[in-house]
Amino acid sequence: MDDLMGGPFALIDHTGKPRTDQDFRGKLLLIYFGYSYCPDVCPTDLQQIALAVDRLGSAGVAVRPLFITVDPERDTAAHLADYVPLFHPRLIGLTGSAEQIGRTALAYKVYYAKFPPDSPDYVVDHSSFIYLVDETGKYIGFFPPGTSADMVEVIKPRLPASPSILVATNFMVGRCTASAIASAAR
Ligand code: NI
């Protein structure tokens, strides 16, 4: 199943900027599909994701939480701009056309459906897994619905090594500065 999960996407972030999966190489991604009008599940899960990132302290910069809407009709970029900062300053909201969202959701096998479909006050039924994608863009796995911020213990050993850590390691074992600088420049 793992090889079939995830993959490329092309969406718009909450600042209105086009974003693809390529933009996030080098970061460990926590990807959550939901919608801003969700009464309880999405806010709870997004809070736990934010807590997990904060628990990593400064190492948390290696993690990028992404919130992909399954309600692009109401979750415009402008609307997401008001929503995502409520949870975390580094949380990125992503939206797009119904077709772009549909394709991305399909890639992650996310189920979503409007209910009732013809009401202006619809809710969106949706699956609520938190997906983990590594710094090369490879899908690693998922956290089940309702996972607490303790997910941080699974995240920690998978953090991509940051250039500063590489430099420090090289320094400590007395290796030459050339390789350390090359690592830092990457
Ligand atoms: Ni929700």
Image (cartoon, grey):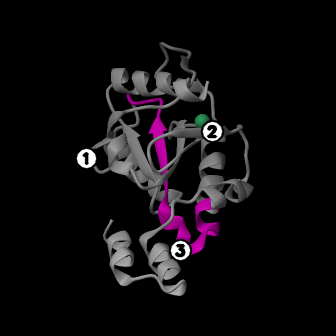
Which residues lie in the magenta part?
52-73
Q: Residue at x 59, y 67 (%)?
A: 54
Q: Position of residue 119 (x, y in %)?
A: 49, 17
Instruction: Say the numbered circle drawn on residue 141.
Output: 2
The quarter of the rendered structure image containing the C terminus is bottom left
> Label 3 to label 1, Cα distance in Å?
26 Å
Residue type for callout 3: Ser
Residue 96: quadrant of the picture:
top left
The one of 61 and 124 positioned closer to us in this rendering: 61
Residue type at mark 1: give it: Lys
User: In this rendering, is residue 172 above or below 53?
Assistant: below
Secondary element at image label 1:
loop
Q: Residue 72 at what x, y percent from top left?
A: 39, 30
- Front disc: 3 or 2: 2
Residue 134, label in figure: none
- Verify whether residue 185 appears in magenta: no
Label 3–label 1 contact, CB within 8 A: no
Q: Which residue occupies 70% across, 37% down?
A: 145
The part of the image, by quadrant, that contains residue 178 is bottom left
Q: Secondary structure at mark 2?
A: strand
In the displayed structure, 82 sits above or below 141; it is: below
Of all residues shown, which one is farthest toward the left? 17
Q: Quadrant of ligand 1?
A: top right
Local secondary structure at mark 3: helix
User: Which residue is labeled 3 in the image?
Assistant: 58
Tell which residue pokes out farthest to the top in this image: 118
Disc 2 residue type? Gly
Question: In front: 42, or 144?
Answer: 144
Q: Which residue is mark 1?
A: 17
